[in-house]
Amino acid sequence: MEAIFSVLQVAIAVGLIFLVLMHSGKDSGLSGAFGVGSGQGPLGGGSMVERNLNRWTVFFAIVFVLNTILLLKKPW
């Protein structure tokens, strides 16, 4: 059971890192390559995509914290 949660933790961490890098920063970062920060690009309008990106990032962060707590408590 611990192995399953550990593998899941790594997958969540990789996803969270990817989502954080997708956010547009001062220099548009990695998200500029996919058109997230601007109104143009393959992903459509910038504001809706940015809002959904924020939601997914928060969701992954919460799941990451909950999984970390489960790994620390080891209820099995």
Image (tube, grey):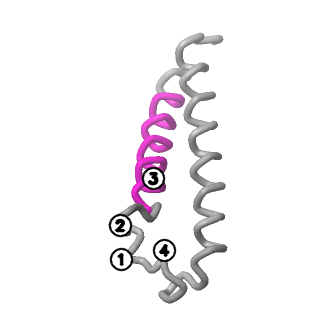
Q: Residues within 10 Å of mark 2 (few under 14, many from 20)?
A: some
- What amino acid type should be assigned to the residue bearing mark 4? Gly
Report the residue at 62% width, 46% height from top.
58
The answer to which of 59 and 70 lies nearer the viewer is: 59
As drawn, the label of residue 20 is 3
Magenta segment: does it hold 47? no
- Going from N to C along the chain, the mark reached first, 4 or 2, is 2
Gap between marks 3 and 2 measured at Cα? 9 Å
Asked if labels 4 and 1 touch by Cβ distance under 8 angstroms, the answer is: no
As drawn, the label of residue 37 is 4
- The dominant secondary structure in magenta is helix
Gap between marks 1 and 4 measured at Cα? 9 Å
Q: Read off the magenta span.
A: 4-22
Foreground: disc 3 or disc 4: 4
The answer to which of 51 and 75 lies nearer the viewer is: 51
Q: Which residue is mark 2?
A: 30
The answer to which of 41 and 1 lies nearer the viewer is: 41
Gap between marks 4 and 2 measured at Cα? 10 Å
